[in-house]
Amino acid sequence: MDNTPTTDTSTSPAAPGLLAGKVAFITGAGRGIGAAAARLFAREGARVLLAARTEAQLKAVTEEVRTAGGTADYVLCDLADATSVRAAVDRAVDLYGRLDVAFNNGATMVPPGPMDEVREADFDYVYAVNLKGPWLAMAAEVAAIRATAGTGAIVNNSSIGSLRANPELPTHGAMKRAVNSLTESAAVTYGPEGIRVNAIAPGPTLTEMLRTWEADSPGVIERITANTPLRRVADPDEIAQAAAWLLSDRSSYVTGTVLRVDGGARA
């Protein structure tokens, strides 16, 4: 008797995507993790609005999504500008009639180096983009979700550098640690309304930021890889996959967490 399970799914309905029926807003969506998230969220059934400062990058990713059969549009957004952030979130509602989920991924980085060598202007800019930006975005996103979908989910992109001393990127680590705190506070504040708020803490990921760091500090990728149990850096899509799960209904009882996606680096 052949007990091999049948794999013929020709008459079975296709499984719905992880984010089917949802409207998703993504910051920093022109490249790296944000662009990977835009492609993935659309494949998983979401209608996506991409936000960033560089129109050429946004346009290219939007066209990729559309060519693959997804629904996407883009809006220019400067995370350091409150009016720009609010207008970008409102654009999602104007386009799609609602907002269900948001991935606050946009960030910037200054040249690596010890804390006393960080220029004040660079500190202020990292604060404006990496901390104030997510705060502004969350406030606008909560208002949009509350007014339209009623319930939803938000994911903030943090870093494993927020979970330990970060002597090479002290400003980056400090702002991301503060994002973790905002995430936890928002989860407690908006959980009773059915709005979940989580963060992911990626390890080193092959993005333009990491390539820039490698250019400034040759050998950094090799050193990081040697200290990572999986012995490699992440692909941006791997980080986007974690964000997609936290935004989906499959993580419906998860809120207030900072999920490490780091290849075991903090194990």
Image: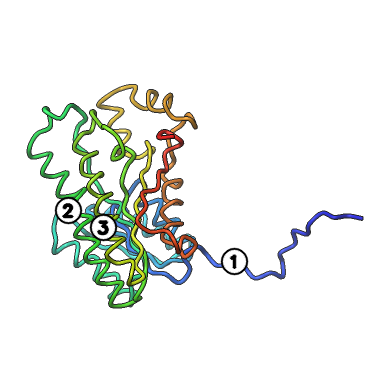
Dot 3 amino acid type = Ser
Q: CA distance from mark 1 to mark 3?
A: 35 Å
Q: Which residue is mark 1?
A: 15
Whichever of callouts 2 and 1 sits on the residue coming sooner in the sequence is 1
Q: Are marks 1 and 3 in contact (CB under 8 Å)?
A: no
Q: CA distance from mark 2 to mark 3?
A: 15 Å
Q: CA distance from mark 2 to mark 1?
A: 39 Å
Dot 1 amino acid type = Ala
Q: Which residue is mark 2?
A: 132
* On-image quarter of the N terminus: bottom right
Image position of 140 (left or right of 81): right
Circle 1 SS class? loop
Circle 3 SS class? helix
> Is 247 in front, or is 218?
247
Q: Which residue is mark 3?
A: 185
Question: From what the image shows, is residue 212 above or below residue 104?
Answer: above
**Which residue is rendered at x = 27% and y = 24% of the image?**
217
Whichever of callouts 2 and 3 sits on the residue coming sooner in the sequence is 2
**Image location of residue 135, percent across then percent down:** 20, 57
**Image location of residue 34, percent across then percent down:** 35, 51
Dot 2 amino acid type = Lys
**Image location of residue 130, percent across then percent down:** 21, 48
* On-image quarter of the C terminus: top left
- Which one is in front in this view, the residue at disc 1 or the one at disc 3? 3
Circle 2 SS class? helix
Query: Badge 3 local density, few (<14 within 10 Å), some, or many (20+)?
Result: some
Image position of 103 (left or right of 264): left
Q: Quadrant of residue 41 in the image?
A: bottom left
